[in-house]
Image: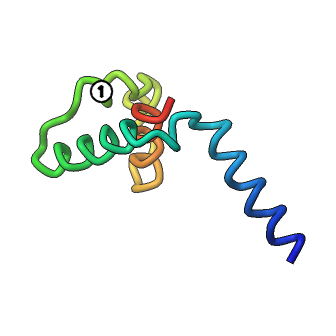
Amino acid sequence: MKNYLSIIFGFIFGIWVSWPGIFVHRNWKCFFDIIEKSKKDKLSLKAAFAISPRFILRGESKDNASKLRIVSDACFR
């Protein structure tokens, strides 16, 4: 039980270090707004600036995990 609590605490702490704004309601609203606009093929300017040029130029894989990371970086940092 103690190990599970340590793992959960470490996971939450690691996410908070990566994205400090993840526990703020306003940032989650931003996250869901970008997701909703992307369904309508309208990209938010904030999300567009969060994409690194290397990601676009090198043609790295654009799987769901990469897309989630980009949107999360745009809203939670």
Secondary structure at numbered mark 1:
helix
Residue 70 drawn at (x, y percent): 42, 38
Q: Residue at x 40, y 42 (%)?
A: 25
Q: Residue at x 63, y 37 (%)?
A: 18
Residue 8 drawn at (x, y percent): 73, 62
- Give the camera-side residue of 60 and 52: 52
Question: The N terminus is located in which quarter?
Answer: bottom right
**Residue 8 drawn above or below residue 60:** below
Q: Residue furthest right?
A: 2
Q: Residue at x 29, y 48 (%)?
A: 32
Q: Residue furthest left?
A: 40
Q: Residue at x 80, y 67 (%)?
A: 5
**Residue 29 drawn above or below residue 57:** below
Instruction: Say few, some or many: other residues with alpha carbon within 10 Å of mark 1 (under 14 / 14 to 19 / 20 or more).
Output: few
39 sits left or right of 54 in the view: left
- Give the camera-side residue of 53 and 38: 38
16 sits left or right of 48 in the view: right
Name the image quarter holding residue 63.
bottom left
Q: Residue furthest front?
A: 25
Residue 76 drawn at (x, y percent): 47, 35
- Give the camera-side residue of 41 and 53: 41
Q: Amino acid at mark 1?
A: Ala
Residue 12 drawn at (x, y percent): 67, 52
Q: Residue furthest bottom?
A: 1
**Residue 71 drawn above or below residue 12:** above
Q: Which residue is mark 1?
A: 48
Asked which colour scheme the image uses, the reply is: rainbow
